[in-house]
Image (cartoon, grey):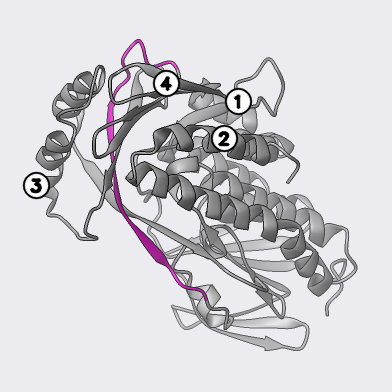
């Protein structure tokens, strides 16, 4: 295989969290990096997310933890409220970037994308929008890639960071199945109530709901609908249907419901899907990372953490091995068990939620966060 210290050219497919992190981490180590992103410039999906401790730890190595904290809302506690409206459990999250900084940050997806994209630009990464990969062929020590616009690239490294339905995974001949878990997750942007200074999760008789601050003025509300058919609803039905599903929760959920009615211009609804790629994540000098290799359920809010960690660890392993193949093998060996455990535990938590066995789910959430605090 080509020496990692030879011609360092890389094509990353996907400009999400994992792709941008990998591209920047590689570029900082002297790689010439391009990103192909199928979406148009400026397009982001969803309202917000949590960057948990492991993702902040990885981003801190790139000098990006503090910009993320400045653009979002720092927190350190998850409060679980039971079906009677009482606090049932508090998870105090590990502070992995220092005792003086928060454990997690809630952040709007557009703000996170700007932070990662601006850093990639400063590192010299070239991003092409409206472009993806349609064919891949290993040619000796390089990968020959055909792009959707008919052009070709020959690069030393191909990185698929293109999500749970990854085209790169398929083109590399790596196969996995995608599982649906009978849950639909609803999210909406709302004004942040003064009492919401941490992550709040509320148990209902059938579903769960919650609130995650993403700035001093904004939060995103979420609802996990259990036993739901995987379907697509017309946009006009999303707000009234989400308000209907929030009826019957105790305590502060009624306030969240009223904020949703007053402040939300849009609601997004997505299926809870998971996947894990057994065996190799790489073939030749192509590799998949993030959700393309391991997509957990959202209950642990750690999909972003795994993707960001992947990008940082990939660059580290390539930097300390004499060939790209050896670096990719080491990357997969280092990451596979950690990611498998997170995916499996996220599914277990989803199952416990659906069975309303919250007293078993809460300790598992705590244990998973402690486990994720271990080095990547």
* First in sequence: mark 3 vs mark 2: 2
The CA span between labels 1 and 2 is 7 Å
The CA span between labels 3 and 1 is 37 Å
Q: Secondary structure at mark 3?
A: helix
- Between marks 4 and 1 in the image, the one whose residue lies nearer the viewer: 4
Residues shaded magenta: 176-197
Say whether marks 2 and 4 touch (CB < 8 Å). no
The residue at which mark 4 appears reads as 88
The CA span between labels 3 and 4 is 36 Å
Say whether marks 3 and 2 touch (CB < 8 Å). no
Q: Residue at x 63, y 31 (%)?
A: 65
Q: Secondary structure at mark 1?
A: loop
The residue at which mark 1 appears reads as 103
* First in sequence: mark 2 vs mark 4: 2
- The outermost residue toward the top is 194
The answer to whether residue 20 shows anywhere in this view is: no
Any magenta on residue 182? yes
Disc ID at residue 52: 2
Name the spot of residue 128 as percent of width and height, x first: 50, 62
Q: Residue at x 10, y 47 (%)?
A: 237
Any magenta on residue 46? no
Q: Residue at x 62, y 49 (%)?
A: 21
The answer to whether residue 202 shows anywhere in this view is: yes
Q: Residues within 10 Å of mark 2 (few under 14, many from 20)?
A: many
Viewer-side residue, 226 vs 168: 226
């Amino acid at each position: 295989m080509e020496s990692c210290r030879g011609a360092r050219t890389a094509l990353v497919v996907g400009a999400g969290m994992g792709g941008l992190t990998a591209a920047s981490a590689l570029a900082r180590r002297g790689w010439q990096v391009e990103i192909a992103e199928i979406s148009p410039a400026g397009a982001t999906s969803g309202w917000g997310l949590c960057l948990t401790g492991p993702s902040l730890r990885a981003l801190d190595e790139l000098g990006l933890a503090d910009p993320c904290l400045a653009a979002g809302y720092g927190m350190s506690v998850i409060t679980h409220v039971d079906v009677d409206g009482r606090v049932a459990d508090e998870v105090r999250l590990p502070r992995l970037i220092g005792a003086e900084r928060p454990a997690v940050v809630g952040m709007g997806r557009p703000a996170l994308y700007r932070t990662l994209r601006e850093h990639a630009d400063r590192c010299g990464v070239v991003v092409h929008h409206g472009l993806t990969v349609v064919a891949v062929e290993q040619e000796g020590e390089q990968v020959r890639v055909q792009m959707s616009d008919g052009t070709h690239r020959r690069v030393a490294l191909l990185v698929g960071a293109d999500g749970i339905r990854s085209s790169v995974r398929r083109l590399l001949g790596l196969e996995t199945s995608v599982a649906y878990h009978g849950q639909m997750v609803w999210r909406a942007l709302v004004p942040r109530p003064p009492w919401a200074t941490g992550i709040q999760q509320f148990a209902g008789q059938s579903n769960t709901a919650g609130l995650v601050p993403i700035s001093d003025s904004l939060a995103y509300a979420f609802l996990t609908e259990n036993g739901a058919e995987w379907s697509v609803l017309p946009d006009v039905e999303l707000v009234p249907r989400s308000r209907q599903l929030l009826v019957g929760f105790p305590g502060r959920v009624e306030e969240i419901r009223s904020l949703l009615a007053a402040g939300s211009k849009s609601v997004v609804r997505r299926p809870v899907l998971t996947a894990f790629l057994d065996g190799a994540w790489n073939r030749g000098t192509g590799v998949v990372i993030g959700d393309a290799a391991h997509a957990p359920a959202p209950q642990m809010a750690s999909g972003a953490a795994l993707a960001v960690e992947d990008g940082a660890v990939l660059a580290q392993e390539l930097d300390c091995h004499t060939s790209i193949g050896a670096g990719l093998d080491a990357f997969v060996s280092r990451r596979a068990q950690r990611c498998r455990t997170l995916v499996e535990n996220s599914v277990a938590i989803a199952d416990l939620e659906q069975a309303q066995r919250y007293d078993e789910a809460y300790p598992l959430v705590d244990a998973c966060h402690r486990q994720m605090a271990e080095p990547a």
